[in-house]
Image (cartoon, coloured by chain):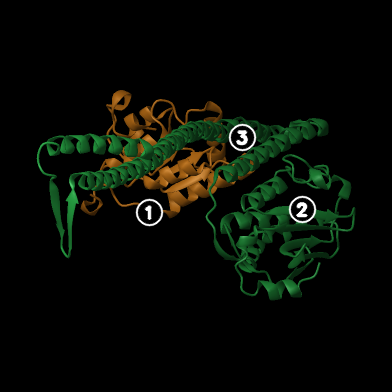
Chain colours: A green, B orange
Amino acid sequence: MVFAALFFSAVFGYMAGIRQSNPGAEGPRKTYALNLGPVHLNLTVGAMGVLVIFLLTILLAAAILFAVVASYRRRRAEAANHELSKENTERRRAEDEVSRLNAELESRVLERTGQLDAANKELEAFSYSVAHDLRAPLRHINGFSKILRDDYGPALDVTAQHYLKSVCDAAKHMGQLVDDLLKMGRIGRQELACRPTDLNSVVERVLQDLQTEYEARRIDWRIGELPSVECDPGLMRQVFANLLSNAVKYTQRREIAVIEVGQATSEGAPVIFIRDNGAGFDQRYAHKLFGVFQRLHSVEEFEGTGVGLATVQRIIQKHGGRVWAEAEVDKGATFFFALAPTSQSSPNTAKSVAAGKL
Amino acid sequence: MTHDEVEILYVEDNASDVELTLVALRRNRIANRIHIARDGEEALNFLFCRGSYADREFLAPKLVLLDMKLPKVDGLEVIQAVREDDRTKMIPVVVLTSSNEQKDMVESYKLHVNSYIQKPVDFDQFQQVVQQLGLYWLVVNQTPQPESPLAR
């Protein structure tokens, strides 16, 4: 490019020289005075031409340089702009994708929530009709059997009276099953209403409620210091009610029952335990203990529906905790439960735990 | 018995329940002045002397025993109608039902029901409940005279 400019300047200069020298051939040699401040130059036409060419060449070179730099800059800016707009487009596409995915997720959540709501409603309707309609025939079976027993009992022989009693008992037992199942179903649907709860006062209230079950018994109650925890007090009461009434029930053959409630540590975390010296169970079947309708004793041995411990487990799991048991046949059982770590809110927990023993 | 002497209006659609309740009432010697309505509509017709009870002279019963799940007009609608009318709003209404669903209980109490009883499955327990109920609402409890100006 620069060479081309020099070439054109040279050609241009030469042409100018010819033009200036042609008239000079007839008259005196023409000179140009160049006044640049202190410098005064008298230049012949040829020298002037060379100077002009020189200056023009420099100008042209500068212009070309400028143009080259400008074009280089422009190209760089264009490239950067291009890059930027590409990035912009990509970002916009990514944003569109994100918002599309969000919308999709939201609609899927809505859809699933709707399905869940529908399932919940169905379940509610189911348990409602169980509560209403399933109990009624049981009441009738029990009622008419008892009227038969009361009004016609003397006319019946011992076997007939035994059959009649079996009918009444069965209806009553099924009524209990229905009630317990409904209660458990309700726990599943219920939302937790957690607040700091003093477990000692929960135990105290439960023992008051259970009084009729054990007032004729000799029980050595050993209630230790329990922490205050973040939990649903109503549900926690059900946990203790089930575990303590089990302890009372399964120690009924002991002359003096010993039922202990306390706090201990398991794998470094605080746990609550309820221990009795009752019938216990075979540890091999411990995994079946918390299943609905699962029982490790016959109804003749110890009455029950097999819903209590399933309810306990459901409540503890709802609190993010776990429940387990250790026992030996005829040597008593210990039930442990631990709530989620965040639910330990008592400032004296550490001290109590250190004092607790397993 | 004329309709005017009715002490208990018993609203129940199930025949076996009616029979068992009547036995329980009779055994507790409180079955003599009871009227049975087999659905909510009949109960309201009786109370407000409408339909087949149009010739009845209005007299509030001492107690309404009410099942929840009834054909045509259900228990909650009966309570609402009873509470909305000046002539009947002070009648004690006791819900006697199979269910102990929180929803039914909450709705009933919102409508100012006086008592909510779940019928026990065991008939011996049911008889005790009926005895306590009859004794309390017909003997122990007192209600204002409907014609008293203060009751308006």
Residue type indicated by callout 1 = Gln
**Of the residues tagged 1 and 3, which is closer to the observer?**
3
> Residue at the spot x=50%, y=47% of the render?
B133
Residue beneath disc 1? B142
Q: Give the position of the C terminus of chain A as an image quadrant.
A: bottom right
Residue beneath disc 3? A139
Q: Using the rendered view, name the quadrant where residue A275 is placed.
A: bottom right
Q: Using the rendered view, name the quadrant where residue A129 is placed.
A: top right
Residue beneath disc 2? A324
Residue type indicated by callout 3 = Arg
Coordinates of residue A132 in the picture (x, y in percent): 54, 34
Coordinates of residue B33 in the picture (x, y in percent): 43, 37
Q: Residues within 10 Å of mark 1 (few under 14, many from 20)?
A: few
Q: Secondary structure at mark 1?
A: loop
CA distance for labels 2 and 1: 54 Å
Q: Earlier in the sequence, mark 2 or mark 3?
A: 3
